[in-house]
Image (cartoon, coloured by chain):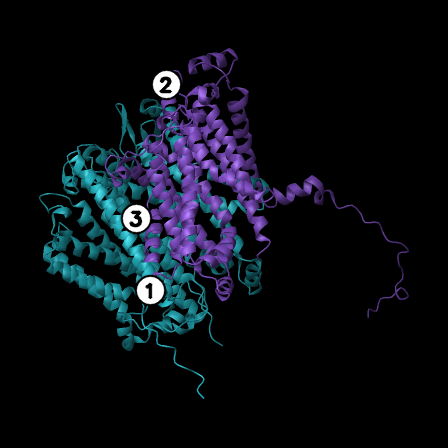
Amino acid sequence: MSDVHAQTVAYVAPSQIPPSPPPARERGAVKWLRANLFSSISNGILTVIAILIIAYALPALVQWAFVDAVWSAGSLSECREIAAARGVEGAFACWAVINERFNQFLFGFYPEELYWRPILTFLLMFAAAAPILFNAIPRKALIGSALFPFVAYWLLWGGPAAPVILAIIGPVVGYVAFRFVEKAMHGDAGATGMVVGALAMVLWWSFVPGLVDAGPALEPVESARMGGFMLALIIGITGIAASLPFGILLALGRKSDLIFIKTLSVIFIEFIRGVPLITLLFVASSVLNYFFPPGTALDLILRVVIMATLFASAYMAEVIRGGLAALPSGQYEAADSLGLDYWKSMRLIILPQALKISIPGIVNTFIGLFKDTTLVSVIGLLDPVGIINPIRADSNWNGIVWEFYVFVGLFFWVFCFGMSRYSMYLERKLATDHR
Amino acid sequence: MTAITDPPRADFRLGMLWTDTRYRSLTIQVIALILVLLGASYLVSNVLANLAALGKDFSFGILTGPASYDINQRLIDYTSRSSHTTAAVVGMLNTLLVAVMGCLLATVIGVVAGVLRLSNNWLISKLMTVYIETVRNIPVLIQILLLAAVFDEFLPSPRQAGADAHMLGIVATNRGFYIPGPVFGAGSVFVVAALILGIVGSVWYARHAKRVQQETGRLLPIWRVRLGLIVGLPFVVWAAIALVAGAPITLAYPELQGFNFDGGIYMRNSLVALWLALSIYTGAFIAENVRAGILSVSKGQTEAAYALGLRANRTMSLVILPQALRVIIPPLISQYLNLTKNSSLAIAVGYMDATGTLGGITLNQTGREFETLLLLMAFYLSISLTISMIMNLYNEQVKLVERTSASGTAFSFGKLFDSMTGPWDTLKKGDAAHQPNFGVASWLNLVVLLYAGMLAAELAFLFLADVPELRRAYFDWTLVQQLTFLLLVTLTLSTLLTAVFKHFRVIDLAVGTLAMWIVALLAGNPLGLMIPSLPSILVVVGCAAAQLGAIAYLVFGARPNVTYFCRVRRDG
């Protein structure tokens, strides 16, 4: 109880005093400036330095990239003439070179009259990805996604349709073999069925599609003519899609109780993660052909895709292993107590949850692999970085440096930044339901 | 009535190999082994058939032949008449050079950017966000190529650069960067000795100050005195000699001589471009790690430290940093690993690192893809495995010890000597109260220095001293000699690493190293040639004695403070 009452003090205000506005320095923009930019002397100095840097760099950058830029010309000297005619002094961007060589940056040396094929493939890719990314789309559409790799190969490389159709039958053959084993073992196929199914599929692929050369043919395009962002996307997307199953198997192998399987997985993963991608690409370009029967000469892009897949699958395995480890052990025990065998518990209980946890990591692996596709320029493939050198060597454009790297870098930046935002969004979305 | 009945003794049937879980895992592994062996033999037979069709064989002999190409950025002597092996070593050293420089600069950039991104200055934190998000999402190859191209195209030629003013003596030309380099004259030995003395003295002083603090609670000024010892002492010696007989160590500034600069240290554009680009790229990743580490320490820790009356800087060094470092360092080390692996992109700008020499020109000249790529991969793999070993050791040191389990029953020399000086585990589990010699960890640094010196000598002997008149090349040794020497190097390296991390098993490895010295001597390794200017017997005896001294110190001397990083929950 307080001793102060209305009766004991001399004066009590009859009404509430209206709140006076905060002092000018404690509100609005001034307060924000004081709190966020000039909260102390050192902060103020930092702010002034930052403002000076921005004031120096940003206008110069805008001037270079937009105001003074030349957008269409036939050569660098023409660019300079146009700029000089406009009274430009100092550096300016000659975007004309990107403008003129835009198709090469997109498609490499793919025949111009066939550009509709990669474009169609690119659009189909979104159609194929949609059922995987969004649950609202009917599950039947996943069949279309499964067909996409074959259609994409046919569209990009051309050739007769019959081998492609026969190749599509491959997974069907594998599945039939799997069901056959399952039936023979009374519904308890597990690893045996998977091995037999995979073997049947690989055998089918290695022998049958080469037999027939019939069917409607698209004009074949050599691998050497592919390049540009198309090539980066081919290697990146194939690598990541193919590495997912391998990565899952390796992660399971690394967590397995079978000491031999575990050792094999650990050696593979640590070896791949321990060497730089460039050495693996050297293997692709100079050694990999030795591992196949004499007489087979695999296409360079195929060899690069094989090595990129192996590379990505090691990283993928570590990401998925993280997901497996993050799962509470109660889930494993619950699956065991239900009487499920190893593969059933993995397929029905463990992997769906573990993969969901690892999705952000998988996206990060994809971003990493996509950035690393630029390395194929070192072994002579004409990806966006590789295609810069022939253009720089062109006497018309000799002397241009920044424009190429800014353009290619911007493309990769947009793609990777978008993907990383998507991964952060997924992380937030998925973080709600297992806390 | 007995409740337990014996299980029916089923006879073993062949089908049980698959249906009985007791045997199934064995069956699966045997089948997998057979499949792997079949696959491997298929691949090997393909390789052999393909090599035979091309008339090639598999041997490393060609590597001792002359390389006949030039390397214009090198740390050790090399001419085009040197062997491919020497060229590979030059490349490996170049890889290590750019990796170490890159790690240092990337750490500086990353820490600064990470801290500034958390700054309450809105503008600065946004600027850092822009830097991090821009650089992280652009392939590092593009950044390397861009920097190299900009250096080549836009920097002035040496002639033009010579006319301009030098910034701090650094000259940037389109042929490379020239920076002032030290020139060691007469009397420089005293300055270097003063430096070493200063370092040893500062280690001793830190130990002394810590002991005073433990005993009396009095704080001695540590950093000022240590700085004075390390920087001030050599400077005083330098100044004294300079007054008497002229400066013993001077800086040589690059001077324009004809078409090029001379003097100082020369760094090719490709090296600088690679170095800067890798540092900027990796720095952005490190910045994110640093930010995550700082954010991971809850604000309550700071407030608790303040409540205990600690000042801001001691709060940072005693409370915040140890906890943040536990989060920061593991990803930091894996970023170092990434930087080292990314340094192989040197080949894109023509910097002759291991990839450029061994995997580039040597591969193309000799046409031996298998051998060169195997060596190249082994080189990178050994770097990676070493770094991840360091990381594992570190993680073992910093992991929170929740329940200390019984120490195993495996034999260890540490345990053998436990009877003499008390059990290791007391030291391992205990905290400062159990350890009268709290600051003694510093003296372990001398053991570390000893092992570092021995490792350097062994590695130099193994790879660098490829001088025909001095000794034969490594590949000409007998297999036993090669193996024993490799083992010796590995053991020394392991001892060094465990000693660096103040690991209590270091003594086992030290004993192993000593044993390997003896085995290597018996196997006829030319150990005496390791330090060419000294007589053989002196080298062997000296090294063995140093090794013995280290072991004796580890056994009988004060124990290393292995709780340095550990936070241990005490019972009760």
Bin the neighbour count of mark 3 within 10 Å (Cα to Cα): few under 14, some 14-19, many 20 and up: many
Q: The cyan chain is which one?
A: B
Bin the neighbour count of mark 2 within 10 Å (Cα to Cα): few under 14, some 14-19, many 20 and up: few
Label 3 marks which chain's residue?
B
In the picture as drawn, the residue positioned furthest to the bottom comes out as B1
Residue A368 seen anywhere in this rendered image of the structure: yes
Bin the neighbour count of mark 1 within 10 Å (Cα to Cα): few under 14, some 14-19, many 20 and up: some
For the residues beneath circles 1 and 3, the answer to whether they share a chain is yes
| Location of residue B556 by image quarter | bottom left
Q: Is residue A30 above or below residue B497?
A: above
**Depth check: A231 or A177 in front?**
A177
Three-letter amino acid code at disc 3?
Answer: Leu
- Dot 2 falls on a residue whose secondary structure is loop
For the residues beneath circles 2 and 3, the answer to whether they share a chain is no
| Location of residue B413 by image quarter | bottom left
Between the residue at mark 1 and the residue at mark 3, the CA separation in whole angstroms equals 39 Å
Q: Which mark is residue B17?
A: 1
Three-letter amino acid code at disc 2?
Answer: Asp
Quickly name the residue at label 2.
Answer: A394
Label 1 marks which chain's residue?
B
Q: Which residue is drawn at 26% across and 33% down?
A: B263
Image quarter where the N terminus of chain B lies is bottom left
Residue B369 spot, x, y in % from top left: 23, 38
Between the residue at mark 1 and the residue at mark 2, the CA separation in whole angstroms equals 69 Å
Residue B236 spot, x, y in % from top left: 32, 49
Three-letter amino acid code at disc 1?
Answer: Leu
Observer-side mark, 1 or 3, equals 1
Quickly name the residue at label 3.
Answer: B381
- Dot 1 falls on a residue whose secondary structure is helix
